[in-house]
Amino acid sequence: MNHDIPSKHAPIALFVYNRPEHTKRTLRALSENAFADQSHLHVFCDGPKSSEHDQMLVQEVRQVVASEQWCGEVTVITRDENWGLARSIRSGIDSILRQHDRIIVLEDDIETSPGFVRFMNQTLAMYADDARVMNVSGYVPETSYQRWLSETFFVRVMACWGWGTWRRAWKQSRWEGAELLSELERRPGGVAGFNLDGCYPYTEQLRRNLIGEIRTWAVFWAASCYLNDGLSLFPCRSLVRNTGFDGSGENCHNAPGLQPRGPLAEQIPVKKISIRESLLGREYFKAFHRFGSDSRLSVRIRNRFRKTKGQVAQMVPEQMKEPLRHLLGVAHPYGLALSTQRQLQTMNRCDETKVKLFGRDFWIADAASFLGSHDEIFRQGIYEFETSQTTPFIIDAGANIGLASIYFGMRYPGAEIIAIESDGLVCEKLIANLKSFELSNVRVVQGAVWDANSELYFSADGADGGRVSSLGSTMVQGLRLLELFEGRSVDLLKLDVEGAEIRVLSDCESALRSVKRIFVEYHSFANAPQELSKLLSILERTGFRYYIEHTGVHSGRPLVRRETQGGYDLQLNIFATRQHGSN
């Protein structure tokens, strides 16, 4: 099916009350959407409360609604009484889904980009028959870490600013708060999981609804989705903006951090992805709710706290100290608590340990190399690339304990990944870590990439420096890399093989034109001729343009003294892409 131009356009439900200017802005933006002229808009106008001023505003809203043909077809439903937002939305969605199998939902303060209706129709068509997908959102919060989000991704979180669903999913909605709370509390980890591991008080919203402090609807739908293991699809950039944080709304107050600071996305590329929660996406929402739109604020808070922690400790009630330690000790979207980072920095080389990474168990062979790789891969994003492929083919040669493969698996959920590791003890941790992250799309191959399938002497160091060497005391199986991808298109070849890179690339040269991108770590042996020119010549002959960065060992004043480490006097990260780009 061609999802670029859906054959059936979902009806759009708009819920309005007493804000004429917000309503006009919402309708104007909606009318400028692609497919608006082919869509059926249902406007549900809530009735006034008792005051004359409210009655006047409600009448003004209805005049705005009637003033133009905002969409291809417009149906207006007016209430004589004030139903309130929660009742109005539930009833309105129910009535439309009795006649249609899907719906797009807006409120009077949701400004949409011109690509919103297209995105919603594409995704509602694409996932119509996938029972676990219960919600599609046009909104995503904006932070400085947005660049590592996939174009679309799934999270077990619901956002109610410009969203859509299906009849099959809405049938599972539940509105008894006590029952929802009870079931969440009975399930192991239910409350913590629903509350994004303590980052947002969803269950508190349910309790406040129960005692009548607030009257909202979205948290009930969110709990219904969560208890059904439902997923929401999100775009990488927001297609909507909430204009209601000016004190005019029923449930909104001033909260500028929730709003996109830049322009809304004009269009989001849509392609079907694996139906499972994105760990990166979940961490993104956790970080946003914990730190807001700019995590630099959390850094300032922590720094200020450290300066005055002796005074603060005497002032803070004992029962509050542990939650504060948790708040100030956790990290952000990179999945590693700051307290864990500090602990790892005190460990000796090759000390083994287990940590929590993105909330999953992760086994480490060497703390120092782990911290360096974690920073490069998750904070700097050195392996990130853009692709139109839904199932990119990635070779991770020199996979070590799996950080890069895990990043690839989370960043490109449909990818086919081959992870190759030569050190047997390190490979055991690689396998355990991939299992912990439930990455079924990664195939592990134990062996040393080489130019022949033969047994090789190997020098293991238990960390990230094991390499093929005639002085080695261990035998490993050599794997001819060429045979792993010959005849196939490779989206990324990552080659970190501790000095074997030139030998391997020379053997693969005839097939490198089928490779779109290469990352190679170059190692210069201190007591051997340098071969960087050979490596760069191979890349040039096969049509690559390369970029070089220092990594690991390098000499700050090489004309005075050469630094060496692990037998190397120079290490470089080399990134190679096609001259005219690739997808």
Image: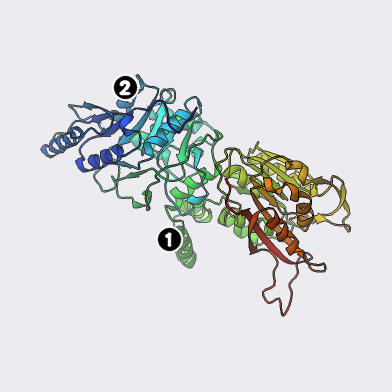
Left or right of residue 233, residue 86 in this image: left
Number of disc labels: 2
Left or right of residue 417, residue 127 in this image: left
Q: Position of residue 186 (x, y in %)?
A: 51, 31
Residue at 30%, 36% in the rendered image: 107
Mark sitting on residue 95: 2
Q: Position of residue 421 (x, y in %)?
A: 75, 47
Residue with the mark numbered 1: 315
Left or right of residue 72, residue 384 in this image: right
Q: Position of residue 19 (x, y in %)?
A: 21, 40
Relative to the observer, which residue lies in front, 400 or 556? 556
Q: Amino acid at mark 1?
A: Met
Q: Is residue 197 visible?
A: yes
The span from disc 2 to disc 1 (Cα, nearest Å) is 55 Å
Residue at 66%, 53% in the rendered image: 543
For discs 2 and 1, the disc positioned in front in the rendered view: 2
Looking at this rendering, what residue extends furthest in the left direction? Answer: 52
Relative to the observer, which residue lies in front, 227 or 14? 14
Looking at this rendering, what residue extends furthest in the bottom direction? Answer: 560
Q: Amino acid at mark 2?
A: Ser
Left or right of residue 233, residue 420 in this image: right
In the rendered view, how is the structure colored?
Answer: rainbow
Relative to the observer, which residue lies in front, 315 or 255? 255
Q: Is residue 213 visible?
A: no
Looking at this rendering, what residue extends furthest in the top direction? Answer: 99
User: Mark 2 or mark 1: which comes first in sequence?
Assistant: 2
The answer to which quarter of the image holds residue 496 is bottom right
Disc 1: CA contacts within 10 A as few (<14), some (14-19) or many (>=20): few
Q: Is residue 48 above or below residue 567?
A: above
Q: Secondary structure at mark 2?
A: helix
